[in-house]
Image (cartoon, rainbow, N blue to C red):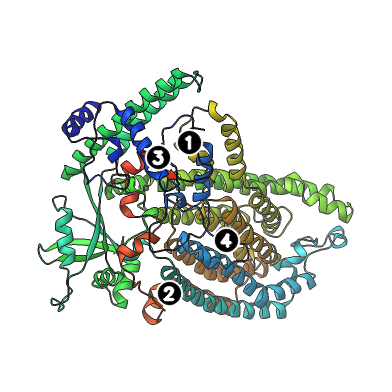
Amino acid sequence: MFETLESNAQKFEGQLNSFKNLNVGSSLETPIPIEAGGMQRRIKQSQYNSKLDNSLNGETSYFYNPYQIPPNWKLAEIHKRATQVGKPKKQFESFKNSEVCPCCGFQLYKRQINMMDNYMLLSFLGSGYPLFFSFAKYCIYILATILLTSGFYNLWTNYQGNYCATKKQIKLGLPYACTADYISTLTLINKANNEKAIAMQNILNLITTLILIILCIFYRSEQKQIDYDVDAEEITPADYTIMVKGIPQDMTENQLKEYMVDFRREGEEDRDPLVVVDICYVYNVKNVKNVEDQIHKLVEQKKAALKNIDEDSEEFRVLTNEWDDKIYYQLLQSISYLRCVKDDKTQFTGYAFVSFDLEDDKQYVLQSTDQTLWEAIYDYFFSLSPEFKEIKLKQTNQILEITESPEPLDIIWENLTMKDSEKSGIRQTTRYATIAIIAVCAYIIYLLNKYQNDNSDNEDSNNSDLSFTNQILQQFSFNNLITSAAIIVINNFVITLSFTYFVHIECYNTRTVYNVSLAKRLTIALFVNSALVITFISFFVTKNVYQKGGLVYTTFYYFVIDIFLSFISSLIDEDYYVYLIKKWWYSRQGKKSRITQKEAHEIYQLPNHQIELCYAELMNNMCICVFFAPAIPIGLVFQLIGIFFYYWLTKYFLIRYKRMDCQISTALSLQMTNFLEMLIPTYSISCALFEYSAYGQISIIQIVTIVISVLFSAVPVQVILEYIIEFDVQVEDVNYMKAIHQFTSTYKRENPFTSFERRHFSRKYKDESFIQLDS
């Protein structure tokens, strides 16, 4: 490939003049005048001229060079400030160089979010973040609803019951189904002989289910309105852009633009032309990766050459200039090569992002694919990609697929390069691997649960005369906690790490879809391991639900351990402490450091917040709590406390110690809400299951409750609500070219092809006070 770069570079060498004429904001579509010889002299002359020009205005101009060695740590600190969470300023004009980071272009002087601020202020991170905190709030509402409508009554009547045998009754040799202790007396089995309380409990369970259905419908409506409110609050490129799929490789950008400008719906041929302001074609990103690998090799060679040389010596400066020349020339060759790639039609992926001047124009095109309610319901159940809709170009009769565009920072560009068939094959393999891991983990839990049961029987016979205090301590012995502790370890390490890797290699087009896939998979797997596996083992293998070492004991210990571990793990953010150690280790080297400026920025930027793991943990705790709530209602109290603290700790670490590289859309929250609605049939089925295990029968009321909840979960509530409820939707009246100054980024700025120059060439940073790159 290197030879190809050489030949392509020679093709453009005659057009090159000087490094000073480099325009960082330009794309690969614009020729860049450069001259191959005497590069270092021209770079220095360019810097000198820039300083001279800016001195007239009382400012000094410096260059951000991603390959500078040693790095400027103050500039890395500026990058950290630019990438941490804060609300950006809004204005309809360009920001000064001193107001943005020269590396990423993010604003430096952002508004700090406070703990007591409304979570809607997080709208600049995408609607996914306000919706996450709204989601957590409704999780608290759901648990509080269950506790108030049926949980407190369940807990009180359990405590007042006398079905579990006391030590005296056991010594007399009377038959018993459970032993009276501080755990069993709070569980469902303890009122098995109170028919009146059981009948009342069934009625309350039905009322709880109906209230939860109403609560979920209200939440769906609020969720959609939050999404619209965020869209109205934040002006983003996606407000003006559609994503197009299936474009023929021989269709040029100009041709696509003409088709979009002349686009008309049936019967509206006299409508004014649409105004298309930008089109971003997506090319095979592997070509960019190839040339970046070549550059990376040169940078590593530069680091090795400078490793043992005094940074203040003349030899160091000479070698630095020589290697900078080599890297610079490689960059010029790479630009030439990528231009040739762009001219190769086979490298076009068929994806494009088309931006209109007004949001009205974008909505006009999207509304041409509007469906009836029944068509939308059919797509909900049977379409493989319901988000994409087909349009027909009248000029060519070609069919293209369009959808709402994701935000530029949400797109995983290299994954757009892969064919759908390749992705399907990878995902099929990871599904089998997922099932295999769940099965292995389930078998481990089965063995540990069996061991716990065997040992609990021996302990009961040996410790029947212990004092009450010693009995409590005995309950928390290793043998009794082994299954609960193993479930937590397996969930937090084996399941989470392996599934994160699987989803990563499945190559989704956006980070939101990646997050959706990971959160869904983790939610299911964690619930299976934490609840369904041990329930199946207790009901059908060990047949021990309410006795020592049985299901209710394992679950009670799980609640107790999990609430403390979750609090501690949330309070002690290991990612942040690793970040502090790395930052201290590298920055202490000062001028002796041999890492690049780009690497210094990566070290200094705060850890990325992983919202998908937050959703998965929250949903896992909700599923387990609601599933076992009928048998162990005290778990509702534990989880209410746990989720309350989790809400505030997550918000605190997000606004103080995290960064966000992407803007998360509403899709993640919508998918998690589908899981949230599944809690309703989960609750009603578990009520019947534990009623049968304790009393040997299932009442008619419980069967009615199950039917109602299952029917509700099968209905596409979101689809129906969007058709029957009038939401307050505000369309942007600012045109694209005026709104562009408020954009965090754009499609061409994030596209690896069109952003190659911006990411690899030096850029200016102006400041009168403390930035000195060569310090």
Q: Residue at x 64, y 70 (%)?
A: 691
- Place of residue 16 in the rendered image (x, y in percent of width and height, measured from the top left): 21, 35
Nearer to us of marks 4 and 1 is 1
- Place of residue 454 in the rendered image (x, y in percent of width and height, measured from the top left): 71, 46
| Viewer-side residue, 676 vs 244 | 244
Res. 618 mark: none
The amino acid pointed to by label 1 is Leu
How many other residues sit within 10 Å of disc 3, few (<14), some (14-19) or many (≥20)? some
Q: Is 732 situated above or below 340? A: below
The amino acid pointed to by label 3 is Lys
Residue carrying label 4: 113
Decide if residue 477 is on the left or right side of residue 27: right
User: Marks 4 and 2, how far apart in space?
Assistant: 34 Å
When asked about the image quadrant of residue 361, the answer is bottom left
- Place of residue 32 in the rendered image (x, y in percent of width and height, measured from the top left): 24, 40
Q: Residue at x 85, y 49 (%)?
A: 463
The amino acid pointed to by label 2 is Val
The amino acid pointed to by label 4 is Ile
User: Marks 1 and 2, how far apart in space?
Assistant: 57 Å
User: Marks 4 and 3, how far apart in space?
Assistant: 37 Å
Q: Is 158 situated above or below 182? A: below
Residue carrying label 1: 773
User: Marks 3 and 2, how far apart in space?
Assistant: 62 Å
Residue carrying label 2: 717
| Viewer-side residue, 29 vs 291 | 29
Residue carrying label 3: 51
Nearer to us of marks 3 and 2 is 3
Decide if residue 689 is on the left or right side of residue 72: right
